[in-house]
Image: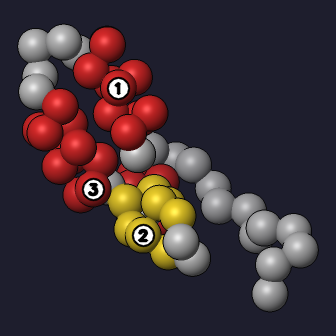
Amino acid sequence: MNKVVESLHQKFPSVSKSQLRNKVREMSDFVDNRWQVKKEVLDGVGVRISPEKGRG
């Protein structure tokens, strides 16, 4: 998550890192030991979720 926050902070330097981190957490869930964007967020921007190969 730190890399995402750093990248966003470079693009939006006027926004604090804590605000960016909070927004990223709002849009994601910690699942299977990693952060994943919530399905409803992906649906809202028109991104389809493909099933991961090799999982299950």
Drawn side of residue 52 relative to residue 13, left or right: right
Observer-nearest of 7 and 51? 7
Residue under label 2, please give it.
Answer: 30
Q: Earlier in the sequence, mark 1 or mark 3?
A: 1
Drawn side of residue 46 relative to residue 51, left or right: left
- Where residue 55 appears, x then y in whole percent? 81, 78
Residue under label 1, please give it.
Answer: 6
Q: Amino acid at mark 2?
A: Phe
Tell me the residue at 24%/57% (across/down): 26
Q: Earlier in the sequence, mark 2 or mark 3?
A: 3
Residue under label 3, please give it.
Answer: 25
Q: Please determine whether, in this image, residue 26 is positioned above or below residue 10.
A: below
Element class at badge 1: helix
User: Quadrant location of residue 32?
Assistant: bottom right
Q: Amino acid at mark 1?
A: Glu
Crowdedness near tag 3: few (<14), some (14–19) or many (≥20) residues, C-alpha within 10 Å: some
Question: Do callouts 1 and 3 mark residues in contact (Cβ within 8 Å)?
Answer: no
Observer-nearest of 27 and 33? 33
- Where residue 44 appears, x then y in whole percent? 40, 52
Residue 43 visible to an observer of this rendering: no
Whole-number angstrom distance, CA of label 1 to CA of label 3: 14 Å
Q: Earlier in the sequence, mark 2 or mark 1?
A: 1
